[in-house]
């Protein structure tokens, strides 16, 4: 699709045609099963100052935590015992030697602890290429690093223009991840203040040009203690735009993994279903111990949904690797 076609569909030009095309692309590209990733929110400690985020370093209202090694492993044990197949480990963007070693130790332990081993996705922000390589060798094989917006000018309305937050550093990290042989994932927020339909269309072209193996994108939700203003779009507008974005990316990249995000479910009690029907094929239910996850609030009113009680066509016990990665690395 070209830019004009994307804008046409994002503006609601023909939803029935759009979702029919995305359903066909999903069926052909990844099938109709949904892959679960047990989400472990390892730490809410973050040195960054992203203006939209509830765990930004200047936020003094929250109780900072870092899960202990044995608690991380216990959460992974829960995932394995319940036939998840894969986990995702998420945290603030720490870059200390101690943090790097903790992740390495966890990965090393999990490679020999379970048979077959769990698939492991990391979402730990920008790191050095050496750290990415170290974690890849220790057992991680997927990495999600969201760009949030591909518009550099808009990017700096979300983050300060300082050495810790540079747009080009984000791009370099995505390149480094590819060179370290990860399944590379990225994604964007939808409904940001001052974001246009053209911005969103360009985001889709960016993800296509980046040749991502997986994607997580969802609606922007304000955090009460973050300075970025609320969206200028209504909740319904953000929901509709999100499912159109999912559908369009599925058509553009039929064989990648696409997440139906918790943010979408937070704004709509049927958000997961709408995301999956639009073309998503991954869910990330939270398996963080309750004593920790209560303090991992990236945005307000975050929802927790038990996917066991829903008819999401879950494929248990499968790694759920991206067919796109498999095809691209043959």
Image (cartoon, grey):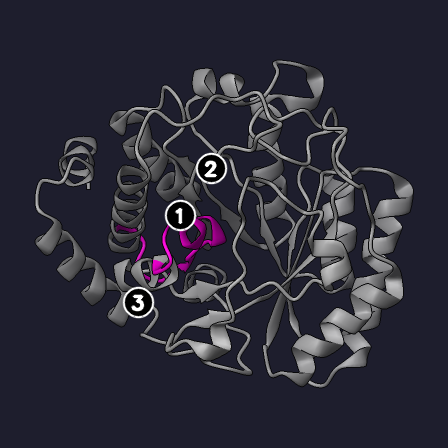
Question: For numbered disc 2, what is the local secondary structure?
Answer: loop
Q: Residue 242 lies in what quarter of the image?
A: top left
CB contact under 8 Å: marks 1 and 3:
no
Residue underneath mark 3: 29
- Say above or below: 211 vs 119: above
CB contact under 8 Å: marks 2 and 1:
yes
The residue positioned 49% from the left and 22% from the top of the image is 155
Residue underneath mark 2: 221
Q: Earlier in the sequence, mark 3 or mark 2?
A: 3
Nearer the observer: mark 1 or 3; the answer is 1
Residue 36 screen position, x and y as percent = 51, 71
Would residue 223 appear left or right of 269 to someone viewing this image? Answer: right
Would residue 102 appear left or right of 155 to someone viewing this image? Answer: right
Would residue 136 appear left or right of 99 to someone viewing this image? Answer: left
**Could you say which is closer to the camera, residue 322 or residue 61?**
61
Q: Does residue 207 belong to the magenta stretch?
A: no
């Amino acid at each position: 699709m070209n830019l004009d076609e994307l804008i046409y569909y994002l503006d609601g030009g023909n939803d029935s045609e759009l979702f029919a095309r995305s359903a066909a692309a999903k069926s052909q590209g990844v099938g109709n099963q949904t892959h679960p990733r047990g989400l472990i929110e390892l730490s809410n400690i973050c040195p960054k100052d992203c203006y939209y985020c509830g765990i930004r370093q200047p936020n003094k209202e929250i109780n900072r935590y870092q899960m202990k090694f044995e608690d991380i492993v216990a959460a992974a044990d829960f995932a394995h015992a319940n036939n998840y197949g894969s986990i995702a480990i998420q945290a603030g963007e720490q870059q200390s030697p101690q943090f790097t070693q903790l992740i390495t130790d966890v990965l090393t332990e999990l490679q020999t602890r379970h048979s077959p081993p769990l698939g492991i996705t990391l979402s730990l922000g920008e790191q050095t290429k050496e750290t990415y390589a170290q974690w890849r060798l220790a057992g991680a094989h997927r990495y999600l690093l969201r760009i949030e917006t591909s518009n550099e000018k808009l990017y700096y309305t979300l983050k300060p223009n300082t050495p810790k937050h540079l747009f080009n550093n984000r791009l370099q990290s995505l390149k480094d991840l590819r060179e370290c042989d990860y399944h590379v994932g990225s994604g964007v927020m939808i409904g940001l203040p001052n974001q246009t339909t053209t911005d969103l269309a360009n985001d889709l072209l960016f993800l296509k040009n980046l040749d991502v193996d997986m994607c997580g994108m969802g609606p922007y939700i304000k955090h009460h203690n973050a300075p970025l203003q609320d969206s200028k779009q209504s909740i319904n507008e953000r929901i509709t735009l999100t499912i159109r974005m999912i559908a369009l990316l599925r058509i553009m990249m039929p064989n990648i993994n696409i997440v139906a995000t918790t943010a979408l479910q937070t704004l709509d009690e049927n958000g997961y279903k709408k995301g999956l029907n639009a073309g998503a094929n991954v869910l990330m239910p939270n398996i963080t111990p309750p004593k920790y996850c209560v303090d991992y609030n990236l945005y307000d009113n975050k929802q927790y949904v038990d996917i066991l009680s829903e008819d999401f066509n879950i494929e248990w016990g499968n790694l759920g690797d991206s067919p796109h990665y498999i095809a691209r690395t043959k």
